[in-house]
Image: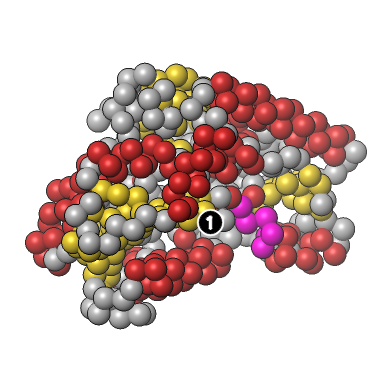
Amino acid sequence: MPATYERKDCRLCRSTDLVRVMSFAPTPPGNQFLTVEESEQEEETFDLYVMHCQNCTHLQLGVVVDPEILFQRDYKYVSGTSPVFVQHFKDYAAWILDEYGIAENGLVVDIGSNDGTGLRCFKELGYRVLGIDPATEIAKEATAQGIPTLGEFFNSQLAKKIYDKHGRATFITSHNTCAHVDDLEDLMRGVQMLLAYDGVFVFEVGYAVDVYDNVYFDTVYHEHVDFHSVKPLVMFFDRLDMTVVDVVRVSTQGGSIRVAVRKKSSPNLQISDRVQACLNLEQEKRFQDPRTFLAFSQRINDIGAELRRTLNELLGAGKRIAAYGAPTKSTTLLTHFGIGREQIEYIVDDNPKKQGLVSPIHHIPVVSNDVLKSDPPDFLLILAWNFAEPIMANNQEFAQRGGQFILPMPEVKVV
């Protein structure tokens, strides 16, 4: 495919009745951190805007970037670097087994398995496991660590190969991957093909309601082609002869939904009341009306103005500012709000793969936590806001020396 193309129809219901509701500054891929030498070359940026489907209410990016650019070129995110995510995956596995029973020697396939952190929980419980992830180097590392992982994109063709070799899967899981896939319908046909007759597909994605309520606009970046809510998903799976049987709201990524899906032919199709509760909530929020999201855009701009004012006042008073966390979403926030090296001296990140590099477009140096001791700023802007509590708890020495934290959303706070 070309580097980008404009998506003209809804990914979930195929309607062409789409309305543009949010526009952001163009950016490079948000996770494309660079060496100093690479930063001297011009970076390619891609348009970033959100469309609203008038038929099913789904939200999706208007421009799709080639996934090989996003995920296969030295992708640097690894879930195992976050203790919060490690614990979440343990809880995730326990929930699946509590809700849907234990199948001896069952196969668990994880789509977008990254470094295998999630599958390791199932392996320790005696399951056969198989990871699928297009980030080839991370897939190799996961395999070397005992989690067999295919360095490929999951689709219906790969599902057939897995079925032929391993049989059907008791559970298919996916964490924050179903917002990344352009041809989501083909992926789900692969899920349906591979899933056991009474198996369960469980996936987690960011919930558009939480994005809306908390103004988490920076989750809009090129890797996230979709912003999911329950109504469009129910319609989508129904069209594919599958049924959403449960939706649980969870706190990861600032607010997500854990969605359980079965084949319509499954003998266990009891639907939780939580599904209807989410449908009612989305109706109350007026997600069916594009004007809801046009007003949301103004809220975003107001926060940006307040954050710039706060940073400029601190700089004017002679204060030094750094940032904590270099997640993909930081590129959207910094770029859309016009914040760069003039305000931020460096970014602290716990991922060794990013340390020593510079951030996309702004070229802010990424350093280890040790720099907070050797060259501490006065203020830390927390860009990894979904980890704000553990970041502040783990940096009490910085706070005890007089350092303060700046939280950008849902409203600007200095703590």
In the drawing, does residue 188 fall left or right of residue 253? left
In the drawing, does residue 179 fall left or right of residue 128? right
Name the element at disc 1.
strand
Residue indicated by mark 1: 250
Please tell me which residue lies in front, 189 or 5. Answer: 189
Image quarter where the N terminus lies is top left
- The residues colored magenta run 386-391
Amino acid type, callout 1: Val
| Majority SS type along the magenta span | helix
In the drawing, does residue 331 fall left or right of residue 51? right
Asked where in the image residue 238 lies, by quadrant, the reply is top left
Vertical comparison of 259 with 235: above or below: below
Q: Residue at x 49, y 45 (%)?
A: 278
Tell me if residue 380 is in the magenta stretch.
no
**Residue 62 on image: x %, y %:** 41, 25
Asked where in the image residue 228 lies, by quadrant, the reply is top left
Vertical comparison of 272 with 42: above or below: below
Q: Residues within 10 Å of mark 1 (few under 14, many from 20)?
A: some
**Residue 277 on image: x %, y %:** 50, 47
**Residue 189 on image: x %, y %:** 20, 46
